[in-house]
Amino acid sequence: MLCKKTMRDGILKAAKQRFLHYGYPKTTMAEIACDCKMSPGNLYRYFPGKMDIAFSIAEKHGQKTLDDLREVVRDKTLSCVEKLKKFHFTVMQETYRSLEDDPKIYEIAQILSKDRPEFANAQMARERALLVEILSAGNASGEFHIDDVVFVAEMLQSATMKFSYPQLWSKLSLEKLQRELSGVLNLVLGGLLSSSAEVPIDDLAPSLAPTTTG
């Protein structure tokens, strides 16, 4: 007999495929159950409703992003300034490509933002904790001079909100979004850098956007 986690993962995989093909509104629990070769009643043992399935799919995607961001934060080859830049570009690029590759994810994102706002709030809190880690390390290294790293992390998220869920806010290309994010970070870093930091603010702009691959 398959364990509960394996069953849940199978349901999420089948539901995601159906959501991406037919769209969230047109998908029913009965159809997901059929794809999983189980009865609707059995499906409800694992998920109370379709929204709960969508929520779990989003959580898995959010966890993947968090894992990638942790790699940035723990990368000992990067300065804290570089980590801060790469952090924000990673968030934007992953979300942009996800929505670009699977347009119907945009539909699910809109529904979740309306019906389950706690998902976005929790994800932002986890990402903010990683930003606090970067800013605190920057204070320790002398790159930054920040009195309240928690407040600054929150303000960084507010300033870059457009780039966290880019297609929800605009129809700009990734190239144009990268240019805008470079400009925003350039301005923000000007206020965060310690007067003794070795990286002048004027030298930041050319290297802000990491090289993207296909």
Image (cartoon, rainbow, N blue to C red):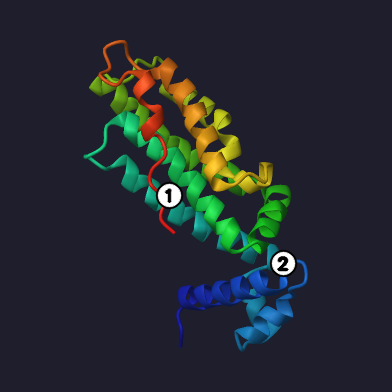
Q: Earlier in the sequence, mark 2 or mark 1?
A: 2
Q: Nearer the viewer, residue 124 or 8?
A: 124
Distance CA(mark 2)–CA(mark 1) = 25 Å
Kindly identify which residue carries mark 1. 66
At label 2, the amino acid type is Tyr
Residue depicted at x 35% and y 15%: 145
Q: Is residue 147 above or below residue 182?
A: above
Q: Residues within 10 Å of mark 1 (few under 14, many from 20)?
A: some
Q: Nearer the viewer, residue 96 or 177?
A: 177
Q: Is residue 129 left or right of residue 8?
A: left
Q: Position of residue 183 (x, y in %)?
A: 50, 28
Question: Element at badge 1?
Answer: helix
The answer, for residue 196, to whether it is visible in the render is yes
Residue depicted at x 45% and y 42%: 89
Q: Position of residue 203 (x, y in %)?
A: 34, 23
Kindly identify which residue carries mark 2. 24
Q: Is residue 78 above or below residue 98?
A: above
Q: Is residue 207 left or right of residue 171?
A: left
At label 1, the amino acid type is Leu
